[in-house]
Amino acid sequence: MYIKHRSFVFLLIIFLITTTSSAQQVYHKDGKMLSVEDLVKHNNPEEAIHKIDSLLEKTNKKDTESRLWLMLAKAIVYDDNFEYEKSFSILLKILDESLPEKLHRISCETYLKLASASNKSADFEEIEKYLAISEKYIIKYKFEDLYSQFYNEKSGIQRLRNQLDSTIIYANKTLDYAQKYKNEKDIARAYAMLGAAYGPTDSVKAINYFNLAIPYFKKQEDYTLLAMMYFNIASEYLYFANIKEGLLFNDSAFLFYDKMNYFYKENIPKQRYDVYKYLGKADSALYYLEMTYNEAFNSVYFQN
């Protein structure tokens, strides 16, 4: 066993996951109704922000509901791109309008998103506060389809606390509601969370769940999480020094390398470096180490 910290990226990948409702229609354009999900693109945040701003300019200011859904989409894009302060600011502005207007669905989803954003900073008090409020909305207004988002966040809290049994319980609840309401984003995230939770104790189950998530992320064209599922599977094999299978899945991750979010990219060549270092292939190890450092530098540069 040569990779001693395989759980690190499990933790990273789960708690930088966001969820969106696929049911909300927000804007009519060229005869097609766009949803929040249509506007949130994982691979080109600048294009997504530009699209949303363009739609906001065209939206009637009196159409508060459509405008707030667009703002929520914008907050999600910023959050996906690790611009948390911008995201938080927008989410709070949404609440300032949605609460007095009694736009309960928007308020509920905004509280869920605030919980998700707080999840990334491991602020358990804030997470629990926002989740408690969102659950009241879900119960009172019968937003049962939002339970998959709610339990995804509950599962995330337990994963942060390293309470793996509770993580699995809530992830399965996520999966139950996501399948019931055909929310494929949350189905994928539930499988990823289950893979992460089983990773430290049961590699067979972990690999199975990561494999189950792959077709959903592929369908959603979420190339970052798709690549990271392959990465996580490779990590499981490499942890037990199964080099052949590990390299095979690392190869699969590299297929989507150029389409990944900068924050995650360094993990792929770093894994390759670890393999060649383990095998004593100095030239190949150095090549991937340099690639890792370049991506690490880019990640810090873009965040600042």
Image (cartoon, helix red, strand yellow):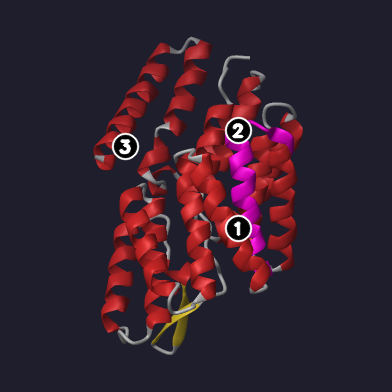
- The residue under label 2 is 161
Amino acid type, callout 1: Gln
How far, Cα to Cα, is label 2 from label 1? 19 Å
Q: Is residue 143 visible?
A: no
Looking at the rendered structure, the secondary structure element under dot 2 is loop
Looking at the rendered structure, the secondary structure element under dot 3 is helix
The residue at 64%/37% (across/down) is 196
In this rendering, the answer to whether 302 lies above or below 221 is above
Residue 84: x percent and y percent?
A: 36, 49
- The residue under label 3 is 299
Mark 2 or mark 1: whose residue is earlier in sequence: 1
How far, Cα to Cα, is label 3 from label 2? 26 Å
**Is-magenta flag for residue 159?**
yes
Residue 30: x percent and y percent?
A: 39, 88
Residue 267: x percent and y percent?
A: 45, 32
In this rendering, the answer to whether 8 lies above or below 82 is above
The residue at 49%/19% (across/down) is 274
The residue at 63%/47% (across/down) is 154
- The residue under label 1 is 149
Quadrant location of the C terminus in the rendered image: top left
How far, Cα to Cα, is label 3 from label 1? 28 Å
Quadrant location of the N terminus in the rendered image: top right
Residues in magenta, as a range: 143-165
Mark 3 or mark 1: whose residue is earlier in sequence: 1
The residue at 45%/85% (across/down) is 32
Amino acid type, callout 3: Ser
